Image: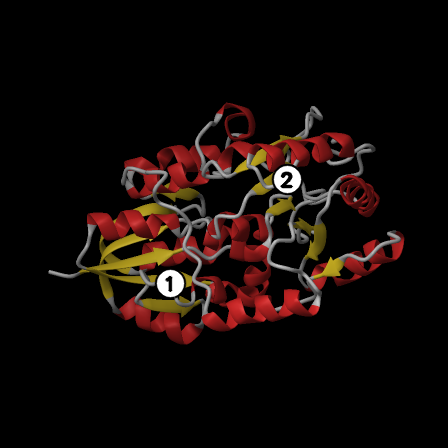
């Protein structure tokens, strides 16, 4: 008999994308199943076309009313936002896992496997320093399914996105054998200092351009338009700007990169999903929760107050300032050489 499964994961696009490995585990455990996913409207596009998802719902009244009438065999809520917690309690399901809402408004585990993740959100010492589990290991633990590194992100790229990227790089005179390094220049507004400063990015670009035979593309969205414009003004050679594109077209550009340099951002998660080599830089967030699947390197700030997950920061130098550009450059060269991307 077909299992009816509902995943509740709202969050940001990157957070939703890094949850998709769970679909592999669910389909392996419940091969005959119908999987529904509830998320924010903005995150629907990263799940669109996913072969394991039968129904996609956004957090709208009409969707919620329908879900409150239905009954599921299995519900898992992996989001700690208040609407998700409340809906995990209210939607009918024979078995519930993940996070729910207590009578006093507190986050509660809906099953034994979720107890550790709830505690992780309450104990900074545990989350910042003691925990060694990746996000994927944590959500599989919540679902009480064994995690495997074979369970990777799922991001479907339509043919139009591949064609867009091909035409984009062709117009920029990028040849098939050119080595392209993508640099994500921003990191959203949620946490402070998740990416290098403009001055540090310019210094890194100068080093890369001077010493390596590569092409550089600045990766970003609407929040990075002004940043990328300023960076282009500060360098005296031509670099490519991705501009602002729909998420799948943007992912097509990332897919062409031989290496992506990024903070803990959506771009990083897209690179992981598309199996691109990545150099991930960590300041205010926990590096140990990020699974690179053996295709990247991490550079971690050694400033004592990192990680912190603060929304604002007035420290000088901050966690990203404390990372030397020379160290990033040397790591790029070493990684490219070790993976035979550079030609001696």
Q: Residue 295, percent across and down?
A: 50, 39
**Residue 177, position as x, y percentages in the image:** 61, 54
Q: Nearer the viewer, mark 2 or mark 1?
A: 2
Query: Above or below — where is 327 with respect to 256?
Result: above
Asked which secondary structure carries label 1, the reply is: loop
Q: CA distance from mark 2 to mark 1?
A: 37 Å
| The N terminus lies in quadrant | bottom left
**Residue corresponding to mark 2:** 343
Q: Is residue 17 left or right of residue 7?
A: right
Characterize the local packing of mark 1: few (<14), some (14-19) or many (20 or more) Cα atoms within 10 angstroms: some
Residue in the foreground of this view, choosing between 104 and 134: 134
Whether residue 167 can be seen here = yes
Q: Which residue is mark 1?
A: 50
- At 61% from the left and 71% from the top, the residue drawn is 167
Is 162 located above or below residue 103 in the figure?
A: below
- At x 33%, y 63%, the residue is 51
From the viewer's side, name the closer residue of 214 and 157: 214
């Amino acid at each position: 008999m077909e299992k009816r499964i509902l995943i509740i994961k709202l969050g940001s696009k990157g957070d939703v994308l890094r949850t998709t490995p769970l679909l592999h585990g669910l389909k392996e455990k419940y091969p005959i199943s119908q999987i529904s996913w509830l998320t924010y409207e903005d995150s629907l596009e990263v799940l669109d076309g996913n072969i394991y998802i039968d129904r996609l719902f956004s957090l709208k009244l009409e969707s919620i009313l329908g879900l409150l009438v239905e009954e599921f065999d299995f519900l898992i809520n992996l989001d700690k936002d208040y609407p998700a917690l409340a809906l995990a309690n209210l939607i009918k399901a024979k078995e519930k896992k993940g996070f729910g809402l207590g009578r006093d408004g507190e986050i509660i585990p809906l099953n034994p496997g979720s107890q550790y993740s709830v505690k992780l959100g309450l104990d900074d010492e545990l989350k910042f320093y003691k925990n060694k589990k990746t996000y994927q290991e944590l959500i599989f633990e919540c679902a009480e399914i064994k995690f495997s590194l074979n369970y990777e992100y799922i991001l479907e790229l339509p043919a139009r996105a591949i064609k867009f990227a091909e035409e984009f790089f062709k117009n920029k005179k990028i040849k098939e054998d050119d080595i392209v390094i993508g640099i994500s220049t921003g990191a959203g507004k949620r946490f402070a200092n998740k990416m290098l400063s403009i001055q540090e990015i310019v210094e890194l670009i100068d080093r890369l351009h001077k010493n390596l035979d590569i092409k550089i593309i600045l990766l970003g969205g609407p929040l990075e338009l002004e940043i990328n414009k300023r960076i282009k003004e500060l360098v005296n050679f031509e670099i490519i700007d991705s501009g602002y594109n729909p998420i799948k077209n943007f992912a097509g550009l990332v897919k062409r990169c031989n290496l992506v340099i990024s903070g803990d951002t959506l771009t990083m998660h897209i690179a992981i999903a598309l199996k691109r080599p990545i150099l991930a830089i960590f300041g205010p967030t926990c590096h140990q929760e990020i699974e690179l699947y053996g295709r990247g390197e991490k550079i971690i700030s050694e400033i004592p107050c990192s990680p912190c997950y603060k929304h604002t920061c007035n420290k000088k130098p901050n966690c990203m300032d404390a990372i030397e550009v020379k160290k990033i450059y040397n790591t790029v060269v070493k990684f490219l050489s070790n993976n035979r991307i550079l030609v001696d």
